[in-house]
Amino acid sequence: MSERHRLRSLVTLVKLNGLIPIRTQPLYLINLLASPLSFLFFIDVISKGALVAYGITGGLILTMLSAGTGLQSDLTHYRHDLKFQDVVIASPVEAPVYVAGMALSELVYSLPGIAVFVVLFAVKGYASPVGALIVGGVLVLVWAFATALAFTLATYFEDVRETFMFSPLISLMLTVLPPVYYPLSQLPHWAQLLARFSPTTYAANLVQAASIPGQSISFGTAAIDWAVLLGVTLALFAIAAFKARWKEP
Amino acid sequence: MSSAIVADHLGKVYPHAPPGVSALADVSLEVPTGGVYGLIGRNGAGKTTFIRIAATQLAASSGSMQVLGHDIATEERAIRARIACVPQESRPLYFLRTEEVVYLYLKMRGLASVEARRRTKDALEELSLTEHATRLVSRLSGGTRRRVLCAMVLASDADIMFLDEPTTGLDPLARREVWQAIRRASREHRTILLTTHYLDEAEALSGRLALIERGRVKLEGSPADLRSRVRYPYRVTIQGSVPREELEGFGDVSEIEGGFLVFAREDAARELARRTLERGARLSMGPVSLEDIFLEVVGRSIDDGSGALEDEEKEAEA
């Protein structure tokens, strides 16, 4: 398959799983916006506006993470209930093109959420141009590792209902317990150590330092955060490449 | 004639299958290039397993298989570029319009927009789906959805098309439309590997057939070959008062509503026909059907029992 054909397949998949379902059911567009906005609302009310910056940075991370992990339900449903994955396997479309197309289509659903939080970000004047670049880079990595994780899991699930069980768990493990919506320093020392097992801790650390006034981290800490985030993303892609079951064993 | 698919001692044991139970065991087959090749057998006989291995969706446990000259284990990409498949129990994406299912599938395969649009229009016309072109799949009947999937694959440029029970749930008219489309693809020198429960369908479409039972190929060849290999290649239906004892010597006799059904060799069938007519009884005579062959080889009807694997499981336990 030539690069032109790959691109055609990719764009078609984005249209097929992203744009067309929204035409049929526009409510999909606010689906991924609901949770991050709810968190923002509670944080704003409870902290009387003092922690709203964490609500916004956390909302951005949660939106991108959900865009990635949301893929597992679609992929599992398409594989088991519709046998669409079998149709794709027996075609020139390669697995990475399929996953990339489906992942980008999930991102389409997140666009309103991203737009809302980016506008809030800009209105509050949180990030400098360099800070915005850092935030953008971190969010891309969060979306990428969540996509790799979702694809791998989706090839093992036997029923779409299993994804209903895993999605809240993943959300809890990656966005609620780790310091995505609050600073790491708020946790007791032992909990800070535990939080280090979640890649979103490093993502939040970088995003908060790059955008929230008064939050800063040393160059060394930033380098470690980037290294961990990149390492986790690459590791999850490697697991997806070698362990995901594209072809049934 | 070159072969589109060559299976050599192919075997498949599913990871969680009980010991001794194989979905496919020592299957060796050659599917010629161009034309329709039918796989027939009961539920669980191994037809879908064979088709899924050939379509590179499922790994084989033993043996080897070449598809279009490429090894299924090491050259999957080269195979996938030239195949298309309607999997068993598959459904089109319900939020698409009928024409989008076909068009987007062709675009996904890399076809340019103009070509994809032309093929979509032709395929919808061929399968009488034009009136449903702009309707959402979720609002179509089950049979129409199945036809949409057939249109999708038959519109493609694939050299091999795997159709796993493509006409299940279709009414007789719709089935015949799908048959016409399959014949058209076959005339274009494409290879179609078809599994079906409908033996009349297999007989009407297939140039060659394989009868699979419990993961093994029991018979293989053209419909004429298959007939020549059964004990009694002719069936004579007699309506009227003819004593059963007079028929016994001609072949295998069974009672049917208002008369008898006799399976016989050609010379015996002719002699039986002559005598029956002399007695003034009515009769019809012809070569045995695929259903008759199936009954003789397998010992029961294709619809009798579901899950040949379960039978094997019980045997293994015994």
Image (cartoon, grey):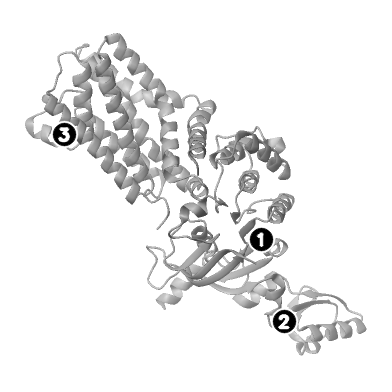
| Residue occupied by mark 3 | A195
Looking at the picture, how far across and down is residue A212, in whole percent? 20, 16
Foreground pick, B282 / B53: B53
Amino acid type, label 2: Tyr
Give x and y (percent) for residue B186: 69, 56
Q: Which image quadrant is residue B131 in?
A: top right
- Name the residue that disc number 1 marks: B36
Chain for mark 3? A
Q: How many marks?
A: 3
What percent of the width, then of the height, locates residue A238? 30, 45
Asked if one can make out residue A177 in the rendered structure from this viewpoint, the answer is: no
Residue A192's place in the image compared with B249, above or below, is above
Three-letter residue code for mark 1: Val
Horizontal side of A78 relative to B172 (left or right) equals: left
Task: Chain letter for mark 1, please.
Answer: B
Quadrant location, the C terminus of chain B: bottom left
Please name the residue that numbered disc 2 is placed on.
B232
Marks 3,2: beta carbons within 8 A: no
Dot 1 surroundings within 10 Å: few (below 14), some, or many (20 or more)?
A: many
Compared with residue B318, is residue A26 higher up or lower down, i.e. above or below? Answer: above
